[in-house]
Amino acid sequence: MSEFKLAVQRFDPLTDAKPRLAEYTVPMREGMTVLDALLYARDYLDHSIALRFSCRQASCGSCGMKINGRPRLACYTQVEELGGEKVVAQPLDNFAIVKDLVTDLESFFTKHKQLMPYVLRSDAQELDHPTAEYLMKPEELKKVLQFTYCIKCGLCTSACPTVAMDVKFPGPQAMAQAYRYLMDERDEGGEKRLEALDTAHGVWRCHFAGSCSFVCPKGVDPALGIQLLRRHVLSGKAPRKQGEGAKVWSAPAGSTK
Amino acid sequence: MKESRLMLIQYATAVLALALVAAHLIMQGVILPYDTAISFNNILSIYQNWIYAGFLEALLVVVLVHGFNGLRIILHEWRQTAPWSRWVDLGTVAAVAVAVGYGTRTVILAVFGGVSG
């Protein structure tokens, strides 16, 4: 049975002065993912390795980490595809480390919420107690479909050079979602979103490095979303104002028709 | 002023600066004799031409606004505290005003004969 070296960055901010790499020898098997390798190391070699994971199928975004220098999902990266005889797992850049490979995502989700990633309507009563199932037209959905694939893994934010410099910059994930809801024909909160983005630390601070799009495991192109957002911010015009959101809906809620 | 307006100014001055600097280099390197392009008397004679003096004043304003606004952006990215941001904005306006004022003074002096060979 062949083996490979797995180097894991170990760091506990409560006890360690600086991070170090701990090396483990892991038996290789066909189709083995980096997450499988990490779990092997944790289960059989060192129980103290801290990592976050859940679905194991690139759906939840929990196991984002830097693998051989690039942000990736551990469950979506096979050891074989990395080549070489050594796999290096480190926590994502641009996030505080909780322990080892576990990063603190609080600021990430705070910024996500600040740009209101949900449909805003002026008819609050209908929003809270819908009388029908509001659907998007297929042609409208196409405009934002790729952005709905975001699993909030944080890889794009980790790869973003502006996030590394500017702590107030919302980051590619939050802004791509802002675009997704700005273009949603049911949404009426465009003006609020554009205002939140048109700041000294907002949408203009993107340098269009494109690294966010490069590392996204779901094929989302946040850099494109940011550039498209800029067009709306520059014009100062939201696609829809209060009361102009789509009023089309399908069958009443609960109906099978 | 909204950041989008400032960025619009940044993009517009970038395009204008490209055109003005290109025209300036063509004038200095191709149309006018290159070997005397930066001689004192030659420059002074250029300033005596009102159209060219206006052109140089425009170049001065466009490049300074673009340059200092770019520096403002870099400084905003460098630190993000509220006092820092406020001082950066104020400092940028002051720096542009002083630099444009000083450059304009030179243009005016040259145009109206305050400078002589």
Image (cartoon, coloured by chain):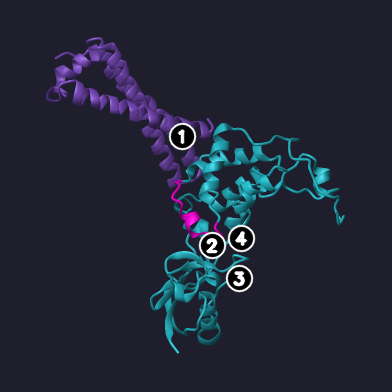
Chain colours: A cyan, B purple
Judge whether residue A8 can be spotted in this image: no
- Mark 3 belongs to which subunit? A
Quadrant assignment, res A247:
top right
Q: Is residue A241 above or below residue A138?
A: above
What is the number of the mark on residue A217?
2
Report the residue marked by disc 1: B89
Please say if the residues under marks 4 and 2 sit with CB atoms less than 8 Å apart.
yes
User: Is B27 positioned to the left or the right of B83 in the image?
Assistant: left
Please say if the residues under marks 2 and 3 sit with CB atoms less than 8 Å apart.
no
Q: Are marks 3 and 1 on the same chain?
A: no
Q: Is residue A217 magenta?
A: yes
Residue mark closest to the camera, 3 vs 4: 3
Report the residue marked by disc 4: A151
Disc 4 is placed on an element classified as: loop
Residue A204: % across, % down:
50, 41
In the image, what residue type sits under mark 4? Ile
Disc 2 is placed on an element classified as: loop
In the image, what residue type sits under mark 3? Gln
User: Is B22 positioned to the left or the right of A204 in the image?
Assistant: left
Q: Are marks 3 and 4 on the same chain?
A: yes
Q: CA distance from mark 3 to mark 4?
A: 12 Å
The answer to which of marks 2 and 3 sits earlier in the sequence is 3
Q: CA distance from mark 2 to mark 3?
A: 11 Å
Residue range (magenta): A207-219
Report the residue marked by disc 3: A57
Residue A44: % across, % down:
53, 87
Q: Are marks 1 and 2 on the same chain?
A: no
